[in-house]
Amino acid sequence: MSRDAPSDDSDEAHLKVSPPKTSAAGVTGVAVALAKSLGQMGAGRTVRTLLRVNQKNGFDCPGCAWPEGDRRHVAEFCENGAKAVAEEATSLRVTREFFAAHPVSELAGRTDHWLGRQGRLTEPMLLDAGADHYEPVSWEDALALVAGELRGLTSPDEAVFYTSGRTSNEAAFAYQLFVRAFGTNNLPDCSNMCHESSGSALTETLGVGKGSVRLEDLAKADLIFVVGQNPGTNHPRMLSALEAAKRAGARIVAVNPLPEAGLMRFKNPQRPSGLAGRGTALADRYLQIRLNGDLAFFQALNWALLETGTVDREFLHDHTDGYAEFERHLHDLDHDDVAEATGLTGEELDAALGDVLGAERIIVCWAMGLTQHRNSVATIREVVNFLLLRGNIGRPGAGVCPVRGHSNVQGDRTMGIYEKPAAAFLDALEKEFGFEPPREPGLDTVETIRAMRFGLVKVFFGMGGNFVRASPDSAVTEEAMRSCRLTVHVSTKLNRSHTVTGERALILPTLGRTDRDVQEGGPQFVSVEDSMGEVHASRGRLAAASPDLLSEVAIVCRLARATLGDDLGWTAMERDYDVIRDHVSRVVPGFDGYNERIREPGGFTLPHAPRDSRTFPTASGKARLTVNPLEVLRVPEGRLLLQTVRSHDQYNTTIYGLDDRYRGIKDGRRVVFVNPDDLAELDIADGSMVDLVSEWPGQDDRRAPGFRVVGYPTAKGCAAAYFPETNVLVPLDSTAEISNTPTSKSIVVRLEPLP
Ligand SMILES: Nc1nc2c(c(=O)[nH]1)N[C@H]1C(S)=C(S)[C@@H](COP(=O)(O)OP(=O)(O)OC[C@H]3O[C@@H](n4cnc5c(=O)[nH]c(N)nc54)[C@H](O)[C@@H]3O)O[C@H]1N2
Ligand SMILES: Nc1nc2c(c(=O)[nH]1)N[C@H]1C(S)=C(S)[C@@H](COP(=O)(O)OP(=O)(O)OC[C@H]3O[C@@H](n4cnc5c(=O)[nH]c(N)nc54)[C@H](O)[C@@H]3O)O[C@H]1N2
Ligand SMILES: [Mo]
């Protein structure tokens, strides 16, 4: 049986539970943010830092990928953006004395929360074979060590290069260039666990794997679906856009098993009226769907659109193919299956259809609630069917809006961080740099862990992130990681991946978004792409957290030079990032004139054929309606379907604090939210302690011990608990079809009461 990493401090003893809130943001939000950042940074630095968020020529907020829109208002930071900045701009430091005092065996017993609270990393550290302490190492020796290991491999495919989504365009482009020049496409990234299902579904159906909606479209929409997303916590600035859309007349329909406060009511901290008063009601309709019920939901809507003949025939004829098969398939839709899968009543479905029929322009927004299930790609394809049926792609106020997570996760993909690169991209690299890039697809995140288990990965290199903690099946992943010869992490903060290592391990500390970046060629800026394809510059303004930090670009360039020599011009790229951007302008479509256009205020927008001209770069040149078989996820008797979510006080594996204010949780994270009717049926008392046990055919049970049961108004049959404490429950082999994304939102579990 696999067990999880240590649970939190002694904090859990103080856990307090109160009823969930019904509104988000407002004055509490900002006050909490300020208190938090004052605690982390010291007053003067805090105010200076926060005033620099979201200003013209400032740095891109590392909080999320929601576009920043008009950056003129000084106070336009959101609560969780402020926390993200405070986390990075903290004045606490992890020094060589810290590592001398704390052996790795001890650090491995610390919680994510504790590790993150120790402060910014300050100099390169090496954990040698057999040692229990990280020791200081010079940059030169550290990079020579990595280069030596890489050059000694039997095949470049024995190395894996992971990326988290904060890495800038410039660093990402240089990184993938190095990896491909070295000879592998082993470039897994956090996307593999995040929006991969969106990319897969959108590329296949529309020809572009990105959203087709721009910020101004929200205010032009008649109807906005927010599906499988908790923007009040994870994209707070989106609430302002939703509020503006409402004022302009849009209806909002939330589809979510949990009653998320941010979707119900919003008190806008940017407006005086938002500070007092009740705020704006956001969702006009709240559909508490069952986990994994969304494919059935959109099929029911699509069936009704066909049935009532309320489709856009001209658009379908001119711009789509696959209609006949699609219609034939939906004709046989089993309405009992729909009822079972969604848990929604006929009246609720009819009412949602009414909203749709009353709307000329429709947008569907979604995030992890749609992407992390076995049938996620099918579900998102069905969302595309839904929008295509009424011509809601390629005109103002309408379209697909996958809301990305990490602040530059979309840009990293655009720059070539992808284990399955398109041939055209590789051709362009070859033309620009004159080497033959590898053509074989590389390993994604789950495949990487599998390959490690077979002893096929000797070197793991992580550009940011927290691979062992973010990945599924924690115990399995940790064991896999330990099988490597060398594990290397380019990081800003300490995390669990530094404590679960290969035979040798390196921590390479780097500049964050907020830090000033000066190279031989002078002060540098980087650029990022948000969720809506807007590319803009980001300049850190604070003194670097330590004089011994290198930028991500510098680390990549020096490592590449140490491994491959300087034929590709690494020295020049490190000196002046304009050199990298010039390369990008010749390799990546949409980036011509990159260096000029990135210097224009607000940056520039990448082209998107379906959005801009209703043209679809698919094989047939048309948008594709798809057939998606409906399989109802049936949970065995006495079991629940568990989703793993973020609390209001975390950024993925970075735990800011132990509260989840909107859901009424204070001072604890080991809670499981369960519908009171389910508790009655299972004969488990609200407030009692249980182990969460997940079941996977043919394998031992997986166990996350010691969770407090919280009776909560979630959809029936569905439970929720926080990630990463519950990653131990997600079987490595439980992934989405096609995208291979771990099914973090639908895990079959039983609750085992503790005596
Ligand atoms: N403050 C903060 N901001 C963040 C992050 C963070 O950790 N903290 N993480 C960033 C990242 S990388 C990402 S990807 C995004 C994540 O943003 P979200 O996707 O909002 O994050 P989750 O907490 O996973 O929330 C999933 C939501 O989907 C709902 N849901 C779950 N399963 C289903 C389902 O089957 N159907 C439907 N309809 N709904 C479902 C859940 O109830 C929950 O409201 O946020 C980004 N922004
Ligand atoms: N069960 C479950 N698992 C999940 C999810 C879920 O919903 N449920 N969500 C998945 C999703 S959507 C995602 S995106 C992944 C996230 O996976 P990751 O991106 O791998 O994880 P993070 O927690 O965001 O990474 C945090 C670490 O990044 C480093 N860092 C922060 N800023 C920088 C920087 O500017 N540069 C560098 N080099 N390092 C930096 C810090 O050291 C910090 O400890 O997790 C996935 N895992
Ligand atoms: Mo994500």
Image (spheres, rainbow, N blue to C red):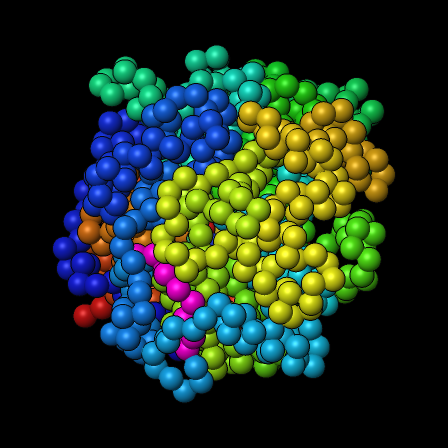
Observer able to see residue 189: yes
Give above or below for 89 relative to 252.
Answer: below
Residue that appears at 31% across and 34% down: 48
Q: Residue 122: within the magenta?
A: yes
Residue that appears at 37% across and 75% down: 134
Residue that appears at 39% across and 64% down: 123
Which residue reaches farthest right? 620
From the top left corner, tell me how far across and down residue 422 is, in percent.
76, 51
| Residue segment shown in magenta | 119-127
Location of the N terminus by quadrant is bottom left
From the top left corner, tell me how far across and down residue 436 is, in percent.
81, 62
Left or right of 412? Residue 259 is left
Residue that appears at 22% across and 68% down: 754
Q: Depth check: 409 or 127 in front?
A: 127
Observer able to see residue 252: no
Which residue reaches farthest left? 14
